[in-house]
Amino acid sequence: MPYPSMSDYREVLQNPRVAFKNPELQTANVKQTPLGLPVLVSGGFALTTCVTTKTNGHNTKWAIRCFHKEVPDLQERYQYISNFLQKQTDKFFVNFHYEPEGIQVRGSWYPIVKMAWVEGDALNEYIEDNLNKPTSLSNLAEQVKLISKRLHELKMSHGDLQHGNMLVHSGNPILIDYDGMYVPGMPYKYSNEIGHINFQHPGRRGSFFNERVDRFSTIVLYVTLIILDSYPSLWNKYHTGENLLFSRIDYQDTNSSALFLDLEKIPKLAPLVNRFKQLCLCSIEDIPPLHEFLNNSIFLPPLQAAFRPSIEKDTLNSSNFIQRQFKVLASTNLQEIVKQEGERITIVGQVISAKYYAEGGMFFINFGNRWDSLGHYKPFTVVIFAQGIEKIYKVKKWDISALEGLKEKYVEITGLLGLYPKNGYLTPQIILEDPYHLKIITGAEARQLLAPPPPQASDPTPPRRTQPTSSTSNRIPPRPKPPTTISGSQTTSSSGSPSVPPRPLPPRPVPPPQPQVVQPISSTTRGSTPPSQTTYPVASSSRSSSQTSSNSSSQTSSNSSSHSSKSSTTSSNDCFIATATFGTPYAPEVNRYRRFRDEYLRKTFLGTEFIRAYYYVAPALAKVIRNNPKLKKIMVILLTKLSKLLPLK
């Protein structure tokens, strides 16, 4: 069953009082971007946001994981994990609570994981900041060794040990993201994920799900830290943003790996590197735990190549064989790009324009002209906030002039894909946060990246639950059926991971039915004047004003022809006049009016009657405001002052 999209979650997180069921979270403050939108980061099956609650004058931060993909046996798996971890006192675990009815979207409840927020650096960021502090990296390697031994003693595995799931606080690593964890007593024979390919043995499949899953990953982490402890210069040469040093291709063909060839020239590292090379060619079932791997008296299994029967030697040596963690798409292939909302993907293409806007402190990299469109979609765009610009200068020494010099060059960009509205169109965008995820390439390299990958051995698909769990909270109502085609679609070549199932196209912006006519929402924030060829990243719901009836729990399509006045009054979530005035339904002022309606007006008879009258006249008034710039300026002043007088906490 489909889960809410990234846009859905961004919308409801604007109003925690309505979104969350947990009373503590209802009063929380959601971390926002510089544009005042909820921050969402991707991790496995979920999108994570940071919220701050206040209890007895004390602020507490939580990581809220909202699921946007179906996870087989999600509630049962987390129950096993919770029961097991509650008995452990290890400091590298994080307290969490699974809530089957945690967040409300479109009138239905969906699960969340409420996890204690960890103040720390991602492993790759910590390494980069401590490359010139050798003892920091060697101490961290010892910490990894202790974690590996403890997981071995507990007969459990994390399932996806990698730089993004290990945070470092005061030199101590902490594990996060427990979606793929294995604990003793689990009856499942398949993992619901196979981890990041740059930290996993090439032979790992979904059917390999036991306490030995993390053995190869912990060895990769330890060996990498030991190497960088003595030779930090290798970081700039081999770190890509999606690894530390090693990548999947290094494990698949150790003899041709440039990294292994460099390491073999260092006598000090030769014994460790040679043993690690042996492991890459062993069967995954024979990988020993880290402490045994480091014991030179332990005999390693004989060399094998059974784990890669479908990959020919010539293919491995070919420059066209580049196996990646994320799907790779051409920047012009909008028909496929827009299907990836909420996913981390890699986009390859030629930059059409690159420009900095000092007013908002943001930089835009556009891969199409403002007048171009494909159906209801605008060209792909990259947005870089001020913090990202600072990181790029720190890592790459690129200033604004260097970024503007990207025009007409081919680039490779990796990040979380979002869809944002402007003037009736949806624009696919990636907000760049990691400088290593932006790379200048040649036209030949772009064609190579987009070439179809060779066929690979597939793993049997784990059985999926066909019936909902006994808890009624997990019954997901069907979403309105989106269009399956885009008129005038292009056929640009692309390549991607076979493990990522195709997704339907997101619903295009559709005008709501009469009489409640709602014009396309502009994403321009109040007080800013972005250029027409760029789109500010503003979250939206691309559904129309179809709502849940007050007397029925069934959902209607966004193309529903009509609604009763009573249904519109009690269920509509639109603030027509305020939205038309400020240009976006996510302006802080609009959110205040929405809260005033939900928390005060709807609780009284007179308030309900006022709402009924408002929804009768507001659509027409909103249209007048949108079409009259002078009136719009006056309304901005009036509604801004009035919003400050509302009796909200």
Image (cartoon, grey):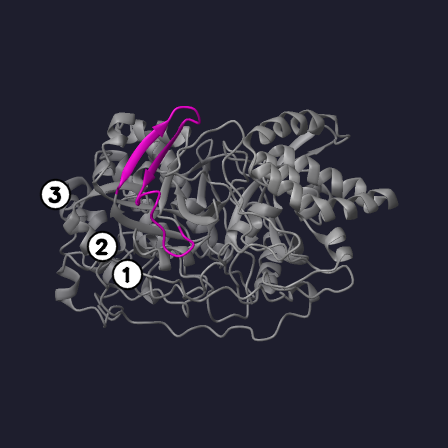
Quarter holding residue 76: bottom right
In this orientation, which residue lies closer to the viewer: 647 or 139? 647
State the predominant SS element of the stretch in magenta: loop
Kindly tell me whether residue 65 is visible in this rendering: no
The circle drawn on residue 583 is none
Question: Is the residue 591 above or below the residue 12 in the image?
Answer: above
**Marks 3 and 1, the one that precedes in the sequence:** 3
Q: What residue is at 63 percent from the left and 25 percent from the top?
A: 637
Residue type indicated by callout 1: Ser
Q: What residue is at 17 percent from the left and 44 percent from the top?
A: 263
Circles 2 and 1, Cβ within 8 Å, touching? The answer is: yes
Q: Residues within 10 Å of mark 1 (few under 14, many from 20)?
A: some
Circles 3 and 1, Cβ within 8 Å, touching? The answer is: no
Circles 3 and 2, Cβ within 8 Å, touching? The answer is: no
In this orientation, which residue lies closer to the viewer: 465 or 287? 465
* In front: label 3 or label 1: 1
C-alpha distance separating marks 3 and 1: 35 Å
Residue topped by disc 1: 495
Find numbered disc 3 in the image and state the secondary structure of the residue it sits on.
Answer: loop
The percent position of residue 505, horizontal first and vertical second, equals 44, 61
Find numbered disc 1 in the image and state the secondary structure of the residue it sits on.
Answer: loop
Residue type indicated by callout 3: Lys
Query: From which residue to which does the magenta span run?
Result: 351-377
Could you tell me which quadrant the N terminus lies in? bottom right
Q: Is residue 623 left or right of residue 494?
A: right
Residue topped by disc 3: 265
Residue type indicated by callout 2: Leu
The percent position of residue 253, horizontal first and vertical second, equals 18, 59
Q: Is residue 324 left or right of residue 178?
A: left
C-alpha distance separating marks 2 and 1: 8 Å
Residue topped by disc 2: 449
